[in-house]
Image (tube, grey):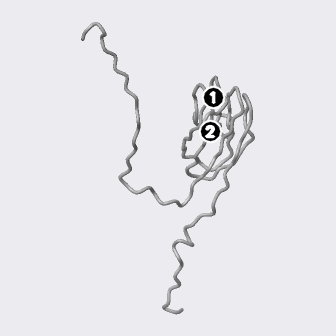
Amino acid sequence: MSGVAARRSPAAAQTPTALPAIRLTGRGKQATRPFTVTDGLAVFRSKCSGCSANFIVELLDSSGQTEDLLTNTVGAYDGSKAVGLGAGRYRLDITADSAWSVTVTQPRNRPAAALPQSYEVQAVTAVSRDRRQP
């Protein structure tokens, strides 16, 4: 055997194949078709722009048991929730009074955000004062 070791590019060895987004759409109350995810992080972006009543999205495991409550709100909604999942088949149980969509993505091999992170929130503060006093 030769004393020369073969070198592999770490990026080539560790870069997983990009996973395609899973797009689910419907109207009203229904369960989605089954979908498959790999082990790791899954991000669920739920939208119901026409909802005026409850919009609920439950993640169900392969036996139909609730794995996680992804969304539970009243009115129009557009938001995301990340969940750590085991590889397998899942469904969503949706309650809505309008058309809705859920997109499932599984980010892979993305660098972490630089720290520290800061976020700015703008809020309106209402102050009431007694009009009887000058």
Q: Amino acid at mark 1?
A: Phe
| Residue depicted at x 56% and y 41% | 80
Instruction: Give me the residue at 59% from left, 37% from top.
Output: 78
Q: Residue furthest left?
A: 134
User: In the depicted view, which residue is nearer to us: 125 or 91?
Assistant: 125
Q: Which residue is mark 1?
A: 55
Q: Residue furthest front?
A: 134
Task: Say which element carries label 1.
Answer: strand
Residue 2, how many percent across, how many down?
Answer: 52, 93
Q: Quadrant of the N terminus?
A: bottom right
- Residue furthest out toward the top: 132
Q: Quadrant of residue 115?
A: bottom left
- Graded by Cα atoms within 10 Å as few (under 14), some (14 to 19) or many (20 or more), the crowding at tag 2 reads many
- Measured as percent of width and height from the top left, residue 16 is found at 59, 64
Considering only vertical position in the picture, is 108 above or below 1?
above
2 vs 34, left or right, is: left
Q: Is residue 134 left or right of residue 54?
A: left
State the SS at label 2. strand
- Point out the tag, 1 or 2, that comes first from the N-terminus: 2
The reply to whether discs 1 and 2 touch (Cβ–Cβ < 8 Å) is: yes
Q: Identify the residue shown where x is 68% and y is 33%.
A: 93
Q: Position of residue 111 (x, y in %)?
A: 48, 60
The residue located at (73%, 42%) in the rendering is: 34
Q: Amino acid at mark 2?
A: Ser
**Marks 1/2: CA–CA distance:** 9 Å
Left/right of residue 67 with respect to residue 99 in the rendered view = left
Task: Give the total number of marks visible in the rendering.
Answer: 2
According to the image, label 2 marks what residue? 46
On-image quarter of the C terminus: top left
